[in-house]
Amino acid sequence: MRGSDGKTRSVVTDLPGAGWDYSITRHPYHEHERPKGAHYCVYNRRLMAVCFDDHSTEEGYWRLRRQATVLHTGEFPLEFRGPDAERLLDKLFTKDITKAKVMRCGYGLACYHDGGLIVDGVFLRLAEDRFWYAQADGDFYSWARAHAVGMDVEIVDPNVFVSQIQGPNALKILEAAAGGLPEKFTYFAVARVNFGGQEVVISRTGYTNELGFEFYIEPHHDADALWAHLQKAGEDHGLEIFGLDAMNIRRIEAGIQNAGSDFDMTTNPYEVGLGRFVDEDKVDFIGKAALATAPRGRRHWGVSCAGEPLIAGEVHVDGAKVGHVTAGAMSPYLKHGVGYLLLDQAGLGEGAAVMVRCKDGSMQTGELLEPPFYDKACEIPRGKLVDVPD
């Protein structure tokens, strides 16, 4: 069985001693998380906190919705630099990245030759010939190296770590920490700011669809001094560390998918609702020929129901299994269960009724919908809608 059985899960905790964690990397702020009773998953061979003993998942969720939270992520930035950096990434990604200007971000979705999905992530264009790609969990480095043969490009691990501050007070914290907001810091912008005497790259991005930004810790930074500076800036705005369990609820509500569970090599972009990130008019990219004739019926849907959908739980129509749940949670805001499911084959549409296996073992009626569950125009992260629940 892939993953847990729905009743138990395997997480990482710190124990005295050394050994047998040789290939696992800790975030620079691991020691700041430890006193909170952190429990981790392994993501890109990096530890990323899923929950903490000092607060509940629901408390973390409401902190995100009402104030501000920080997640020290397991995202893995790769650096592409050289005259052919743009050429290589444009070959690897389904979207035309040549249009991305310096100091802007973009969404990078990569396919195999047969159109199956590998991984996604956010790329930052730091210069005409220099990019960072903060990838989700997945095998991308070797794939990129294999397709760079004959190109004038270096692909290196810059030893950069990503943290994200999210929530309605996020930009207030940025303003306090940097002495003002960067000019033209719009959605998916990149900037360099001064945090307590250290220049830091930030991006107007996140994994929550709340207002927020991400900051990137580089090897030359004094990481502890940087975090102390941001903590002080966040004191009056309710900034607290939280984990993936709390963020997971919000990312489901927001329609954000997780590479490797919500989509993988068995699904193409169209089947999981990511067809808008395929630029069919591009001269070429890996997977283009296959996607030209690939199935386009939607198999991945949001689902709402009274209970909490069970991850890997079966989905039935008229007593027959038609798919499985890929993500599920109880939404404190919507006051019902939310989740994603993947159908074995396309055919059902928005509004269709299905029976969904829930965490308590019951089969409950669910309704298919196209995510996000609310804020359909994604105005919250763009700063066009202030939505702070009571």
Image (cartoon, helix red, strand yellow):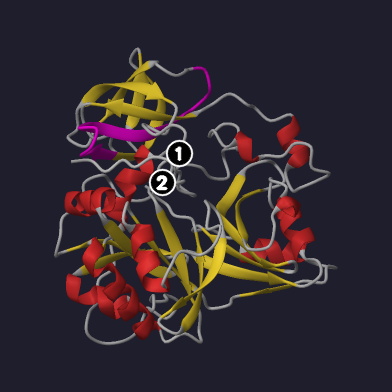
What residue is pinned by disc 1?
Answer: 378
Q: Is residue 334 magenta?
A: yes
Left or right of 122 in this view: 212? left
What residue is pinned by disc 2?
Answer: 209
Corner quadrant of residue 48 = bottom left
Residue plotted at (78% across, 38% down): 289
Mark 2 touching mark 1, by CB under 8 A?
Answer: yes
Q: Position of residue 30 (x, y in %)?
A: 31, 76
Looking at this view, is 290 or 3 the one in front?
290
Spatial CA distance of label 2 from label 1 is 7 Å
In the structure shown, which secondary structural element does the residue marked by tag 1 occupy? loop
Q: Is residue 202 magenta?
A: no
Residue plotted at (35% across, 69% down): 176
Q: Reply above or below: 135 against 263.
A: below
The number of numbered badges drawn on the structure is 2
Residue plotted at (35% across, 28% down): 303
Q: Which residues are magenta?
A: 329-347
